[in-house]
Image: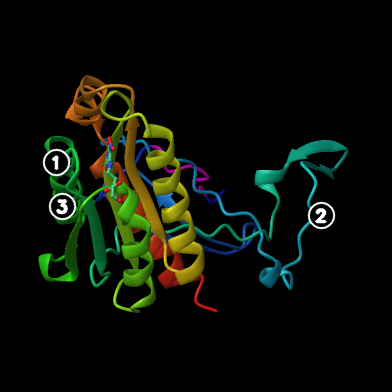
Amino acid sequence: MASFAANSSLLSPNSAKSCVTSSPFRCSCISFTNNDKPTNLAATTAYPLSSLSHQTHKGLGSWGEKAGKKESFSQTSAVRHLTGSLTSAEGLRFAIVVARFNEIVTRPLLEGALDTFKRYSVKEEDIDVVWVPGSFEIGLVAEKLGKSSKYHAVLCIGAVIRGDTSHYDAVANSAASGVLSAGLSSGVPCIFGVLTCDDMDQALNRAGGKAGNKGSETALTAIEMASLFEHHLKF
Ligand code: INI
């Protein structure tokens, strides 16, 4: 039986390979063969898009009946699962918008992102870094970059720290909605890599300290989304 991943929470540059399987599973999918480098990527299963409705599938419920036995939705044949690949990052172009505010945190986040791009074969000349004063300014610049048609994805990096400001909520919410809006209006994936933390310790822990590097995770998400759009969602 063909194996395919519905979740890419454990993968590495060398562990994922694109595959197209035939019967009994007509799926275009990614198969992960080696779990040597865990990441924190969220589940990547893509459920049927309306544009794929020519595919025959057994209804959209959670369960189907097969020979009197219950069959889980994820095992339903003829459903195509579309995911981005982390191994075909070469040729993809990225912009990184990074806030100078709390640079002691945002610079290591940026370095984490750049290091991850390098490990996944994204060329330096395919990356542009744009500095802005603070997280509040990220959305506008991300939208401009997204609409330029020059990039496959835009990473947004910032750090909003509650202790630093009485308008924490305003800055944090504006940054989040600005990045969301940039992606929706440009049609280019804009990835949210803005830390929202209670204090500087918490922020530093997430910028290469004991809680990992969120900049690196942001870069992985950007590669996956760029690949998904480039290889599967060009219509
Ligand atoms: N910008 C941040 O990126 N993080 C913060 O914690 C922060 N604080 O604390 O105020 C912050 N403020 C600046 C803001 O992003 C804008 O640059 C400024 O308001 C000008 O528009």
Taking the spot 45% from the left edge, 42% from the top edge, the residue there is 173
Q: CA distance from mark 1 to mark 3?
A: 16 Å
- Residue at the disc numbered 2: 59
**Percent coordinates x, y for residue 107 in the rendering:** 13, 43
Taking the spot 67% from the left edge, 70% from the top edge, the residue there is 52
181 sits to left or right of 59 = left
Q: Can the viewer see residue 17 in this picture? A: no
**Where residue 136 is drawn, which disc sits there?**
none
192 sits to left or right of 87 = right
Q: Counting other residues with Cα less than 10 Å from the Cα at mark 1, is it few (<14), some (14-19), or many (20 or more)?
A: some
Looking at the image, is mark 3 or mark 2 nearer the viewer?
3
* Viewer-nearest residue: 204 or 29: 204
**Figure check: 36 above or below 57:** above
**Figure check: 122 above or below 209:** below
Say what amino acid the circle numbered 2 marks: Gly
Q: Which residues are magenta?
A: 3-9
**Percent coordinates x, y for residue 109 in the rendering:** 19, 42
Looking at the image, is mark 2 or mark 1 nearer the viewer?
1
Q: Is residue 7 magenta?
A: yes
Residues at marks 3 and 2 touching, judged by CB atoms closer than 8 Å:
no
- Residue at the disc numbered 1: 103
Q: Which SS type dominates the magenta stretch?
A: loop
Say what amino acid the circle numbered 1 marks: Glu
Disc on the earlier residue, 1 or 3: 1
Q: Quadrant of residue 58?
A: bottom right
**Percent coordinates x, y for residue 15 in the rendering:** 30, 47
Residues at marks 2 and 1 touching, judged by CB atoms closer than 8 Å:
no
SS at mark 3? helix
Taking the spot 57% from the left edge, 48% from the top edge, the residue there is 1
Disc on the earlier residue, 2 or 1: 2
